[in-house]
Amino acid sequence: MAQGTIARLTDRGFGFITPEDGEKDLFFHSNELQGVEFNDLKEGDKVTYELGESPKGPNATSVARADADAAPAADAE
């Protein structure tokens, strides 16, 4: 499984992931989420995904939080 970071989220149920390998950002749709709700994601979250192919090009499938078993971090300020 590949890893990356949520780069952008939209209010229309999709977003973009920046892969760790520095490749071009990948589109993902909320239908591809595993174990997390779209509204629970934030830009900057680490995720794992499978690389898929759509008519419009590469995309991310089977998207899950990389730290799904970890407790949410508290803001320290």
Image (tube, grey):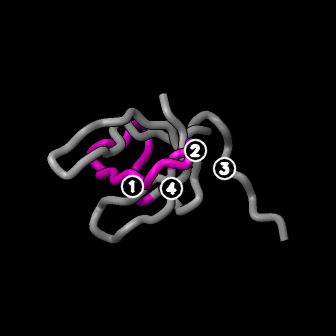
Mark 4 = which residue? 6
Check whether the beta carbons of the residues at disc 1 and disc 3 lie within 8 A of each other. no
> Mark 3, residues whose alpha carbon is within 10 Å: few (<14), some, or many (≥20)?
few
**Disc 4 residue type?**
Ile
Q: Which residue is mark 2?
A: 20
Which residue, given by chain and number where applicable, does mark 3 sit on? 72
Which residue extends farthest front? 23
Query: For mark 1, what is the residue?
Result: 38
- The amino acid type of the residue labelled 3 equals Pro
Q: Percent x, y for residue 47? A: 52, 43
State which mark lies toward you, 3 or 4.
4
Comparing labels 1 and 4, the label whose residue is closer to the camera:
4
Q: For the residue carrying disc 4, how many other residues have a C-alpha within 10 Å: few (<14), some (14-19), or many (20+)?
A: many
Q: Is residue 17 above or below residue 58?
A: below
Amino acid carrying mark 2 in the image: Glu
Q: CA distance from mark 2 to mark 4?
A: 11 Å
Q: Name the residue located 15 percent from the left edge and 47 percent from the top edge.
A: 55
Q: Residues within 10 Å of mark 2 (few under 14, many from 20)?
A: few
Q: Quadrant of residue 25?
A: bottom left
In the image: residue 28, left or right of residue 75: left
Helix, strand or loop status at disc 2? loop
Query: Mark 3: which secondary structure?
Result: loop
- Estimate the spatial distance between the alpha carbons at disc 3 and disc 4, rounded to whole Å: 16 Å
Image height of 38 relative to 59, above or below: below
The answer to if 32 sits in the magenta stretch is yes
Alpha-carbon span between mark 1 and mark 4: 11 Å
User: Residue 66 or 4: which is nearer the viewer?
Assistant: 4
Q: Residues within 10 Å of mark 1 (few under 14, many from 20)?
A: some
Q: Which residues are magenta?
A: 19-39
Q: Quadrant of the C terminus?
A: bottom right
